[in-house]
Amino acid sequence: MTAAFRGPRPGRLLSGGVPLLLILLFVFLSVAGPSIWGEAASASNVAEANQSISAAHWMGTDDLGRDILARTLVATRNSLVLAVVATIVGGCVGIGLGLLSAMSRRLGRALGALINVLIAFPALLLAIFFAVLFGIGSVGSVLAVGASFAPGFARITQTLTASVVSKEYVEASRVLGRGPIYRTFRHILPNIAEPVVLYSTIHIGTAVLALSGLSFLGLGVQPPVYDWGRLLNDGLTRIYVTPGVAIAPSIAIVLAGLTFNLAGERLSDLIAGRRSAPSARRSQPRPAEPAPDPAGDGGGALVDVRHLRVTYASADGRVTTPVRDVSFTLAPKERVGIVGESGSGKSLTAAAIAQLIEEPGHVEAERLRFMDADLLTPDDSTRHVLGRNMAMVFQDPGEALNPAIKIGTHLIEPAVIHLRESKPDAKRKALDALRAVAITDPARRFEQHRHELSGGMKQRVGIAIGLMGEARLLIADEPTTALDVTVQRQILRLVDRLGARTEAGLLFISHDIAVVSELCDRIIVMYAGFIVEEAATADLLESPAHPYTSVLLAASPRMGLDKSRPLVAIDGRMPGPDADLPGCYFAARCPRADATCLSDRPPLRELADGRRAACWHPLTEPGDVPTSEGATI
Amino acid sequence: MSAGHEVAGTPPAKDGAEPPAREGARRRAGAGRWVVFAGRRLVRLVLSLLVLLAATFIMVHLIPGDPVQTALGDQATPQMVAQRRHELGLDLPLPEQFWRYVTGVVTGDFGRSIVTEAPVADLLTTRFPNTLRLAGPAFLLVVLIAMPVGLFTAVRTRGGRGRHVRGWFVNVTGLLNSIPDYVLATVLSLVFVVTIKAFPAAGDEGLSSYVLPVLALVAGPAASLSRIVRVEALKVLDAEYVRAAKARRLPTGLRYWRYVLPNMMTASLTYGTMILAGLIAGTVLVENVFGWPGVGTVISQAVIQKDYPLIQGILLVLGAAVLLLNMVVDVVLGVLDPRSRLGEL
């Protein structure tokens, strides 16, 4: 019931049923208009000639005393029918050319080149050209507008066909010896129909405008036949005498153009399956829950994170929480790895520390510090501290470099901006940095752009940029995932070597526990937005405390540890960021879970050897006292 | 330190084998690449110009009926027609006619108007600059409006935010997009010239007479280009390199100026060229509304009177203007985006 009374929103109103209604109106006018108003439109009455807007003639009369409104309504048929015919003409010629060029390689090249030249010319210019060729009048202008549309149709058909032709079933059909005509009608046309129909719908509107434009120039339909452009042309000559007469045809032209534009947009929305969502955005204020520090004092730490939580409000108002509760510290020079499967919140944790969470994302924490800077209340000095002392290496080395600027510019920017170095100094330093990451011929690379570098080289550049400040912390977010295995090892070695040289701390994010264990002193295991275990690398590998960690280890073929332990197969999936469970998020997949696990959240508590785990039934013996009473969330 | 100390001193191995194509690219480094780029682009321009010349030439020969007879009217005797044909060189073999046509155009001889007998070149040199005076400012305004408006809306509507901004933007640009320039011109002159009398009625009478024609020309293309800019800007704002620039704490201004803007412009201009080219054609209609003394006010009359040399001349200069614009945009793209110089064009 309530849904029926929900008022339409402005955006919805224009893109929803209104275009459909307008199309129906135009169809009705085209069909019935001439028989309803035909008489009024053609009845000349010299006594009432050149009248302005009046009660008897809402839009005035023309020089023969004919009612302009009636003429505008009657002209709907001519304007629209000619536009549809012109679109069909253009569509048939263009689609034909497009298919032809896609079918044969040699013909395709020639036709493609021709289409390339033709498509550069505006439709109106082509239309004038063809109007000269085909002659002035209804037929000439329809052919002219149709011909001016053909290159556009040819191009879209060519592009779409090219993407379909390479598909497997078309290849298969070719192998089966099916002829090109069979392939065209069986496979290609049905697959390109949707976008072509969409393109045509929008072009009916364009055709109305183009035909009216030609008529407006006097090159379209000729008297006594008239369409909207002709009426507007007549109106323009009398605009100083009776200004009203230009209004009706103007409105008709704009409305028709708008209708088909909106209909096209609506169609493409439907095709794309996009749906506009309700607008209300719920905010979920969360009462601050004071909890004892699970990670100790954190004094003197490089990074100090306590009860970090990252939420996202989606467009439809739902709030998801990909990072639920993360607390840890990272001491100067320490190397910490965060491991977890995709969706565990590891990358967002890093992004939160690097202040890279953007709207609609939202960061909450009890404490979030880097060196001396409080990242919860960042000010201008925070920016420089982060710029100077925190470096970040991204997963996709290519995408992290700006294609529009030189490699060198990336390198000197941080030094010039944050360290206030002169450009020559910065350049000298940049060349050193490139040398340090083992890039050959740094002077030349400095001048190059990203597309001239290989994947591994791009990632080396990414690391070199990190060397330009005075990095105390390097955050590496899956820096090797996008690289070849051999290149991966080189990058890892490079990170290791440079880390040792610069004495910077390292926060290394990866889904691969083997990679992390090679580099890091300490490993944090994340699951569903929580830290489930944290321990020194050797301890964690030897005797994982959390059942999830052991599963993770068992699933990592490269580790080859503890082959005696039966491989734990786990069903199910990690709870998504929208889940809201009272107990342990791993419980549903955990072989050791009991009723407590499902009802109560296990706190991240201290076990023996300074390791921490969030589990009611850890695989190793728990220590004395839990450091955290109850979980936060 | 746990692992990997022993490799600290190892000489770095080479990255995975470089694709051989890169070696070729390397040899063409620096200035040489620019020459290749400019050369390719020039060849394309010349080819397009040839197509334009051939099309306007063939046009006259494809028209059903004898253009000379049509132009001279029914009363003309066969002798008059033959005489005229000879004068126009229409009795020569086609290739020779084409050669004369091309050499004529290159030397600035566009023939004479059939109707007025005046040299077409004279008319073009007096009128075409007027058309450019209209198209030039309109062109600049379209870019200067669309880029900031599109970028601003993109920033305001990122990640599903600013739904009202998005709604308004889409509806307003959609509306402006649907108003053809000649209708807008008519309505503008109805309101501001006829009713309010704020601007001169017609012709070129100083700065104030530019306002309405330029406005009529700019509105639609600015709306559709800003739509394209918004979409492209949204992509660029989400790009990893913008995030990386943010991670390096580059100042916001620099981030937009050096990271967002060039990348947004390359993409927008690639798609926007057609919109800008359409503007040149749009002058034809708008000139007719405002009685602007450019080539647009002449062409419709020329078509109706079948004054073929004049039609050819006007189509040639308008077409050449479009091709030149494409070339300029490509060069700008080449400067902004080095990839397009590498022969992807």
Image (cartoon, grey):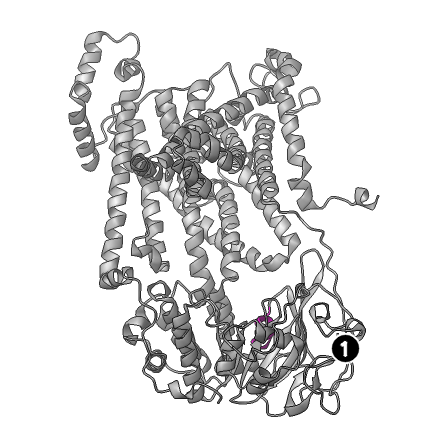
* Magenta segment, prevailing SS (helix, strand or loop): helix
Figure check: A394 above or below A258? below
Give the residue displayed 39% in from the left and 46% down from the top. B136
Q: Quadrant of residue A449?
A: bottom left
> Left or right of A536: which side holds A428?
left
Q: Position of residue A167 (x, y in %)?
A: 45, 43
Q: Quadrant of residue B324?
A: top left
Q: Is residue B141 visible?
A: yes
Q: Position of residue A287 (x, y in %)?
A: 78, 74
Q: Amino acid at mark 1?
A: Ala
- Taking the magenta stretch, the answer to whether it contains residue B55 is no
* Residue closest to the eye, B230 or B287: B230
The number of discs equals 1
Q: Is residue A465 visible?
A: no
> Left or right of B224: which side holds A494?
left
> Left or right of A55: which side holds A303?
left
The residue beneath circle 1 is: A288
* The N terminus of chain A lies in quadrant: top right
Give the residue displayed 60% in from the left and 74% down from the top. A349
Give the residue displayed 70% in from the left and 55% down from the top. A316
- Taking the magenta stretch, the answer to whether it contains residue A353 is yes
Q: Position of residue A312 (x, y in %)?
A: 66, 65
Q: Which residues are magenta?
A: A347-357
* Residue closest to the eye, A430 or B101: A430
Q: Secondary structure at mark 1?
A: loop
> Left or right of A334: which side holds A447?
left
* The C terminus of chain A lies in quadrant: bottom right
Q: Position of residue A322 (x, y in %)?
A: 65, 68
Figure check: A627 above or below A188? below
Is disc 1 surrounded by few (<14), some (14 to 19) or many (20+) residues within 10 Å? few
Give the residue displayed 19% in from the left and 32% down from the top. B104
